[in-house]
Image: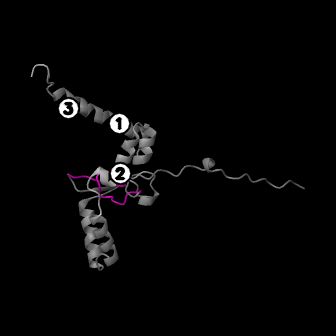
Amino acid sequence: MSEPKRVLPVVPEDLPEKPRQRARTMSRKEMTRMFRQQTAAGGLDPDLQALMAELDATRPRVRGDCAEGPRPCPYVSCKYNLYVDVNPRTGSVKMNFPDKELWELAETCALDVADRQGITLEEVGVIMNLTRERVRQLEMRGLSKLRVIADDEPWRDDEDG
């Protein structure tokens, strides 16, 4: 008789990592089409409209208002929220985490991340759904823009004036 096969338990780190889903951008034209379809189908649910009005009325206006606010932050239209990005030039909306819901994110506010001070490129990549290399590229681009601005600024000598 042969010995029965032994089945080893699967440990989470043995599982292949689920591939990261890329961000999805929706154009203004696409959003308008969706809005028209929703309006034709009967419009927004009154309960949803009431919830949106309540959220808008309680929306923090300054960092002091939101520092101790609810997390994950429900205000996805805030420019510091990591869930979506809006391009002010084109009006397009980029869903940074199309495979996740807001409450599934570890971090939802860029200001909370900045308050921690000093995190690695890997951590930034996870938080922003970008690769480490893309974060490095963006860091270099931002630093070069700051250098240009610093070179253009006339340095004032406070002793003379």
Q: SS of the residue at dot 1?
A: helix
Q: Which amino acid does label 1 sit on?
A: Gln
Give the CA distance from mark 2 to mark 3: 30 Å
- SS at mark 2? loop
- Pointer 2 or 3: first along the chain: 2
Q: What residue appears at the point 27 percent right and 59 percent down from the top-left corner?
A: 27
Q: Residue at x 27, y 78 (%)?
A: 40
Picture quarter with the C terminus: top left
Asked where in the image residue 118 lies, by quadrant, the reply is top left
Residue 3, percent from left and from top = 86, 53
Q: Name the residue under label 3.
A: 149
Q: Which residue is denoted by mark 1 in the rendering?
A: 137
N-terminal of the pair, mark 1 or mark 3, is 1
Mark 1 and 3 residues: CB-CB less than 8 Å, in contact? no
- Give the CA distance from mark 1 to mark 3: 19 Å
- Residue closest to the far bottom: 42
Residue 44, placed above or below residue 120: below
Which circle marks residue 67 in the picture?
A: 2
Q: Which residues fall within the magenta stretch?
A: 71-88
Residue 84 lies in the magenta-colored region? yes
Residue 61 sits above or below residue 45 on the image: above
Q: Nearer the viewer, residue 58 or 97?
A: 58
Q: Image height check: is 129 above or below 98?
A: above
Q: Mark 2 and 1 residues: CB-CB less than 8 Å, in contact? A: no
